[in-house]
Every structure is written in C-alpha cells, then in structure tokens.
Amino acid sequence: MSERAVPQYCPYCGDEDLTPEEEPAGAWKCHACLRVFTVRMVGLALGGNGD
C-alpha cells in the first residue's frame, strides 16, 4: 500500500479528530460525528476552458 496524504478534517462536520480505519481500505473515522469515510482521487482536469 502506498502512503497518501492524510485528510486534515472531516468532510461532513469539519472536525480534525480523525483516525485511520482498517475497513474499508483507506478509510478514516471522525470521532466527532462517528462517520467513516474514504477520499479518492479521480484524476486531473486537463484544459482551461471550464470543461
């Protein structure tokens, strides 16, 4: 598994108290709102015309 950047805050509540979760792979748990989430990069947007 390659190392990735650590999320700085929960995308749901904005809290910063996050810990890694074993399942699903790459998941993070927010201790404030108790949500478990993953962050995934889809790709890079190419071109500058707003598409």
Image: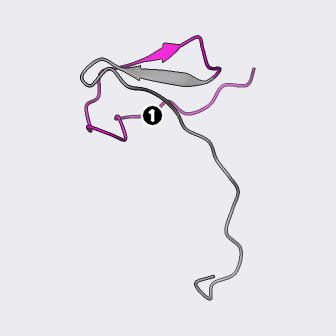
Q: Decide whether residue 11 is among the magenta residues.
A: yes
Give the residue displayed 65% in from the left and 20% down from the top.
25
Nearest the viewer among 34 and 4 is 34
Q: Is residue 23 above or below residue 2?
A: above
Q: Decide if residue 27 is on the left or right side of residue 11.
A: right
Q: Is residue 1 above or below residue 10?
A: above
From this viewpoint, which residue is outermost toward the right? 1
Nearest the viewer among 47 and 40 is 40
Q: Is residue 15 above or below residue 22?
A: below
Residues in magenta?
1-25
Q: Decide if residue 13 is on the left or right side of residue 10.
A: left
Give the residue displayed 75% in from the left and 20% down from the top.
1
Q: Decide whether residue 6 is among the magenta residues.
A: yes
Q: What main secondary structure does the magenta stretch of the protein show? A: loop
The residue beneath circle 1 is 7
Q: The residue under label 1 is which amino acid type? A: Pro
Give the residue displayed 27% in from the left and 25% down from the top.
33
Instruction: Give coordinates of residue 27: x percent, y percent.
Output: 54, 23
Nearest the viewer among 31 and 4 is 31
Color theme of the render? one colour
Q: Secondary structure at mark 1?
A: loop
From this viewpoint, which residue is outermost toward the bottom? 49
Give the residue displayed 71% in from the left and 74% down from the top.
46
Instruction: Give coordinates of residue 51: x percent, y percent.
Output: 63, 82
Toward which corner of the image does residue 18 lie, by quadrant?
top left
Q: Decide if residue 20 is on the left or right side of residue 17.
A: right
Instruction: Give coordinates of residue 39: x percent, y percent.
Output: 55, 38
Toward which corner of the image does residue 50 lie, by quadrant?
bottom right
Instruction: Give coordinates of residue 20: x percent, y percent.
Output: 49, 16
